[in-house]
Image: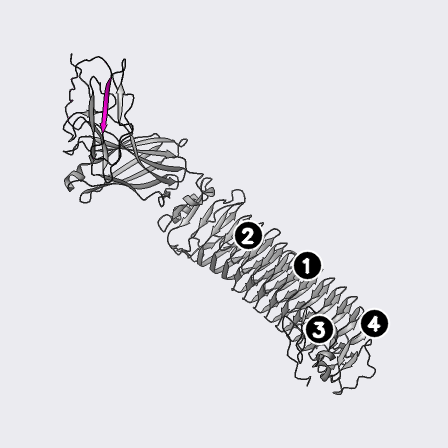
């Protein structure tokens, strides 16, 4: 009896796995080999019927590993194998299948061949190497220019053919999957065949997870005992892929990214720059070349890693639009890092920044921007417009910034539970308007720190504000400023202007300002107004000039606040309530502090030039203790070496000025001590000159407005110096004045 069987069969054996990612698509490539007949006619196998159990032995035929198992049995009533064993492997070769002859001249053997005798079959090998490029580590999704079709491309490389002719005869056939479109282009190169494969998802239905089979067809090549090998593609939805599978962005697809990132799918994805990006300059001067990514209704919550590549020439000129920047609105979990945004020009309304308009609990890390940012309204920053519950760290902006209110060189408004750290800004910052209340909130680094934290940061640009709350670092602070500084000059046309902070109701510590400060009232070298806040371990060195009242070398107006362990060295001038350290101390505390700059009350009429002090202009129900002043002091009336007018407490302090002069009520310690004021244990340099140019001050004692004498000789000796200045926090070296952190050189007027 004859049995005729067609052996054109396909069987899959896994060889190697790769990963291919795309938006809404992750392709995991599993290579497998299959064996089929290569002849055009149907071969016949004739096996005489036999009784009993038969064994098939699988010979590795030069392989490095054995088949597993090496033999299989066929027992009645079965007449075929249930399945073939796991194939052997051989380095540098591709397993093609099994044959009844070692040289491949026999009959191909598959699992459904009838077995009626004991057989030995032999592994068949081809010296072909199949690989997928790019590899799993670098192959990631792409987006084409039509925006709504998501695709990926990869290459199947088959090398090791005997000659170029054989390589060119190999083909790759595809079994289609509904919803996916496959295109294959052959590009043979010598003895290697390259298949360029494009897989595209049409987006019309649910993503078709499953397997697509690519058959490497060898039937037209002589010498191969098998007709084809199959390459199986595992297709899966890749939307949940994390930053490690970030979508690569380059010059070719950056415009498509801008559109796709604003779709529901794109807002959650992770991206990375693979090269420098240069956006085209718009044809019209005030046109845009970018649409902000993310909105209040649909924030961006994915990530972008710039990988330190440059993003050049961002142009956004929508002056009436809010939430403007490379990203308009980012939400919880969003991360922007390693981005180099250069030569940016961004115009908008509210919530405007070069990188982010509004950061809601996201993170900006290790990024910078250069260029200009202009907001026609509020919350405008060189890098970030609003930081609400988010973090900006290790970042900077060299950006000129202009807006109405809450305008900052780096961040416009930094809210509670928000952090700016290890960051800086170097651009000029200007408030050309105000909010509806006349407030500017303009700062060299942050416009308004509304309960947030600023630490280890600085600003060097000039700051100018047309309304209230202007500062070299922060316009206002109700949070914490720690270990930070500002060096730019600061000017304002109204109130609450400071070299570091315009208005402080929080904490400023371990910080300083060195720029000059000029404005009308409530002006300080460090803080314009300290409203119930704390200033400690801080200093200011810039000159301070006020056209009106409450002007101080460190703090203009200390309202129920605390100033401690701090100092000022710049010259100070104003019309009234002018002090070398504090203009007016109202129910506040000034302790362990000093001022060395000259102080001038510039008014000459009966209402100006009043309350002028080397340390505090007016101490109104406050406390001044363990402090000193060394600068010249001059004014119209109520002029003192330490305090111009005192209705509080001044104790354990030193007036070491070279000269204190005025028209009326002039004293070495206090110009006038009102009935409810207390002066206790204070000293004054006995060489201090008065308005007449001599050292005759009348009655002097520890507890009156002239204080007790202390000579140059005593001041240069430890045992002659008041003990309050010989302990922490003071640093004292004999022959010098006590300082904070380091001693202060003895001034020239104390011989």
Instruction: Provide the secondary structure element on which disc 3 rests.
Output: loop
Residue 726 circle label = 3
Do tag 2 and tag 4 residues touch (Cβ < 8 Å)? no
- Mark 1–mark 2 distance (CA, rounded to whole Å): 22 Å
Report the residue marked by disc 1. 505
46 within the magenta span: yes
Circle nearer the N terminus (4, 3): 4
* Residue located 82% across and 71% down the image: 678
Q: Position of residue 641 (x, y in %)?
A: 74, 77
- Mark 1–mark 3 distance (CA, rounded to whole Å): 31 Å
- Mark 4–mark 1 distance (CA, rounded to whole Å): 29 Å
Q: Which label lies toward us, 2 or 4? A: 2
- Mark 4–mark 3 distance (CA, rounded to whole Å): 31 Å
Report the residue marked by disc 2. 391
Q: Which label lies toward us, 1 or 3? A: 3
Circle nearer the N terminus (1, 3): 1
Left or right relative to 40: residue 322 = right
Q: Position of residue 252 (x, y in %)?
A: 35, 49
């Amino acid at each position: 009896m004859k049995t005729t069987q067609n052996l054109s069969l396909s069987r899959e054996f896994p060889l190697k796995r790769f990963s291919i990612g795309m938006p809404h698509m992750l392709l995991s490539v599993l290579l497998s080999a299959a064996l089929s007949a290569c002849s055009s006619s149907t071969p016949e196998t004739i096996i005489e019927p036999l009784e009993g159990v038969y064994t098939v032995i699988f010979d590795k035929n030069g392989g490095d590993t054995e088949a597993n198992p090496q033999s299989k049995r066929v027992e009645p009533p079965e007449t075929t194998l249930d399945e073939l064993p796991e194939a052997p492997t051989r380095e540098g070769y591709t397993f093609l299948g099994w044959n009844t002859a070692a040289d491949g001249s026999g009959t191909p053997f598959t699992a459904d061949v009838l077995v009626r005798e004991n057989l030995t079959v032999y592994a068949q090998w081809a010296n072909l190497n199949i690989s997928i490029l790019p590899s799993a580590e670098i192959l990631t999704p792409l987006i084409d220019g039509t925006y709504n079709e998501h695709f990926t491309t990869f290459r199947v490389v088959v090398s090791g053919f005997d000659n170029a002719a054989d390589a060119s005869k190999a083909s790759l056939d595809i079994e289609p999957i509904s919803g996916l479109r496959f295109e294959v282009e052959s590009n043979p190169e010598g003895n290697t065949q390259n298949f360029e494969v494009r897989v595209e998802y049409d987006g019309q239905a649910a993503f078709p997870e499953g397997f697509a089979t690519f058959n490497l067809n060898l039937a037209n090549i002589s010498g191969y005992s098998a007709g084809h090998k199959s390459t199986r593609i595992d297709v899966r939805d890749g939307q949940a892929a994390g930053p490690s599978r970030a979508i690569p962005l380059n010059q070719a697809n950056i415009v498509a990214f801008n559109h796709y990132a604003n779709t529901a799918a794109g807002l959650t994805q992770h991206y990375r720059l693979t090269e420098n990006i240069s956006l085209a300059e718009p044809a019209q001067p005030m046109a845009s070349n970018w649409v902000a990514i993310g909105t209040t209704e649909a924030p961006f919550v994915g990530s972008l890693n710039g990988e330190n590549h440059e993003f050049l020439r961002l142009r956004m000129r929508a002056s009436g639009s809010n939430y403007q920047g490379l990203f308009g609105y980012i939400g919880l979990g969003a991360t922007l890092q390693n981005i180099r945004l250069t030569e940016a020009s961004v115009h908008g309304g509210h919530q405007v920044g070069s990188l982010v308009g509004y950061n809601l609990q996201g993170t900006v890390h290790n990024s910078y921007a250069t260029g200009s940012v202009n907001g026609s309204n509020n919350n405008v920053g060189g890098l970030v417009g609003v930081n609400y519950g988010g973090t900006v760290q290790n970042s900077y902006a060299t950006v000129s910034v202009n807006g109405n209110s809450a305008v900052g060189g780096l961040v416009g408004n930094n809210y509670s539970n928000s952090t700016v750290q290890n960051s800086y800004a170097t651009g000029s910052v200007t408030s050309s308007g105000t909010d509806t209340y006349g407030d500017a909130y303009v700062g060299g680094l942050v416009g308004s720190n509304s309960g947030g934290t600023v630490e280890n940061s600085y600003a060097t640009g000039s700051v100018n504000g047309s309304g209230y709350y202007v500062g070299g670092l922060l316009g206002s602070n109700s949070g914490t400023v720690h270990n930070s500084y500002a060096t730019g000059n600061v000017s304002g046309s109204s109130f609450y202007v400071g070299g570091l902070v315009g208005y402080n109701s929080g904490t400023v510590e371990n910080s300083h300002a060195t720029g000059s400060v000029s404005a009308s009232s409530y002006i300080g070298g460090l803080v314009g107004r300290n409203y119930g806040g704390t200033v400690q371990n801080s200093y200011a060195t810039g000159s301070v000039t006020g056209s009106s009242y409450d002007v101080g070398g460190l703090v203009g107006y200390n309202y129920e606040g605390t100033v401690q362990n701090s100092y000022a060295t710049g010259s100070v001038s104003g019309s009234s309530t002018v002090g070398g350290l504090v203009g007016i101390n109202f129910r506040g505390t000034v302790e362990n502090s000093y001022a060395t700059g000259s102080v001038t009350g510039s008014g000459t009429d009966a209402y100006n030039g009043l309350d002028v002090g080397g340390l505090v202009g007016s101490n109104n129900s406050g406390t001044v203790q363990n402090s000193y002043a060394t600068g010249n002091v001059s004014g119209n009336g109520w002029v003192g070496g330490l305090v111009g007018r005192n209705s509080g407490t001044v104790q354990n302090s030193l007036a070491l000025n070279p000269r204190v002069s005025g028209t009326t009520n002039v004293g070495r310690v206090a110009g006038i001590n009102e009935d409810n004021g207390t002066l206790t244990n204070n000293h004054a340099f006995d060489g201090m000159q008065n308005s007449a140019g001599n050292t005759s001050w009348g009655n002097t004692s520890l507890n009156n407005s002239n204080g007790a004498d202390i000579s140059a000789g005593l001041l240069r000796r430890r045992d002659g110096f008041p003990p309050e200045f010989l302990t922490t926090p003071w640093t004292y070296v004999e022959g010098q004045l006590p300082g904070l952190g380091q001693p202060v050189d003895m001034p020239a007027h104390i011989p």
